[in-house]
Amino acid sequence: MFLFEVRYWLRQPMVYIFLFVNALLTFGATASDSVNIGGGVGNVFKNAPYVVYTFYGIMSFIALLMVTAFVNGTAIRDFTSNTAQIIFSTPVSKSGYLIGKFLGSTFVASLPLIGVSLGVIVGSWMPWVDPLRMGPNTLSPHIQGFLVMGLPNVLFSAAIIFAVAVIQRSTMASFITAIVLFVGYSIASSSMEDMDNQTLAAMLDPFGTTAVSEATQYWTVDEKNLAALPVSGLVLWNRLLWIGVSALVFLFGYSRFSFTDRVRKAKARIAENGAVPNAATPLPKVALHFDRSALRRQWYTLYRTELVGILKSTPFIIIMALGRNAIPSSTGSSTRYPWPRAPACWPSSRP
């Protein structure tokens, strides 16, 4: 199952498109002063290890919907393609089926994050970049950023989406869950900035950006340019905590999954008083018109029907409600953007 998912997704263009998008974003942040990811870097090298760790933490959060596309597609493919009954009739085990699919989709969903390193490295080579703003490109910070920041964050997102997908077996439910997670974390990250106990705030951050900020709060510029992220203390415990939470979420979805299709309720067609329904009444003959006026009425009727259906649908109402909470207030001096907290040494990103 694991190898099948890897081979399947590597033949799809979506993996490479997402990798290119991530590389383009970090390339712009490295090669241009007009693009910022998480705020400005000040006197720190634009390709410093400290910046690489921050990029991996923030980009793994932004890539939540990318993770959802891979994990949801893997989880419900057999149900949407009507091959579930065939697969469930074979001697495949529940553990082999679910664990293989989950690990395969999570592995593939983490591959586009490699674009973060590609964008930083290629951006540092551009001839228009001031060489005084760039340091040496070393491989170890990129490996550490991927393993410590990127991979656990993808695992956390994938566990939640996979559990929802295998239980609900609905693409809409998976993407609504991703939006809830995206908006909820965006709002919570602003609240964590105001907490008196920043150690607790760092532990409650599932994407680890607050823990990294606290661990490097008193670093000098030289340490940010050269030092590796200490995988101990807050950073270590934060990563272990949320990897454990990811495992528990997956086990919950595992326990609720069943090798059976859902029972579809059919509405009974019972005539009043048990009588046999009357024979169908023939339709009256009408004049058919195919002129421009009829086409305009047909277009308007279809437009109105589809628009009203979308506006009354539950997913649209939920998404609009969540989007309303995600929009920062346009008044007052305390405007905050719903992004992970930038390190204290960075200048504010407020307008």
Image (tube, rainbow, N blue to C red):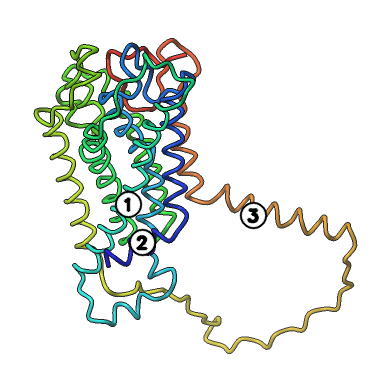
Does label 1 or label 3 sit earlier along the sequence? 1
Q: Quick check: 229 left or right of 63?
A: left
Vertical placement of 173 versus 317: above or below? Answer: below
- Front label number (2 vs 3): 2
Quadrant of res 231: top left
Residue at 47%, 23% in the rendered image: 127
- Front label number (1 vs 3): 1
Q: Pointer 1: what residue?
A: 161
Q: Quick one: SS at disc 3?
A: helix
* Mark 3 residue type: Glu
Per the model, the C-alpha gap separating discs 2 and 1 is 11 Å
Residue 349 lies, in percent from the top left, at 41, 16
Quadrant of res 64: top left
* Mark 1 residue type: Ile
Q: Is residue 284 visible?
A: yes
Q: Which mark is residue 306?
A: 3
The 10 Å Cα crowd at callout 3, few under 14, some 14 to 19, many 20 or more, is few
Does label 2 or label 3 sit earlier along the sequence? 2
Q: Are marks 1 and 3 in contact (CB under 8 Å)?
A: no
Vertical placement of 266 versus 134: above or below? Answer: below
Q: Quick one: SS at disc 2?
A: helix
Q: Quick one: SS at disc 1?
A: helix
Q: Pointer 2: what residue?
A: 74
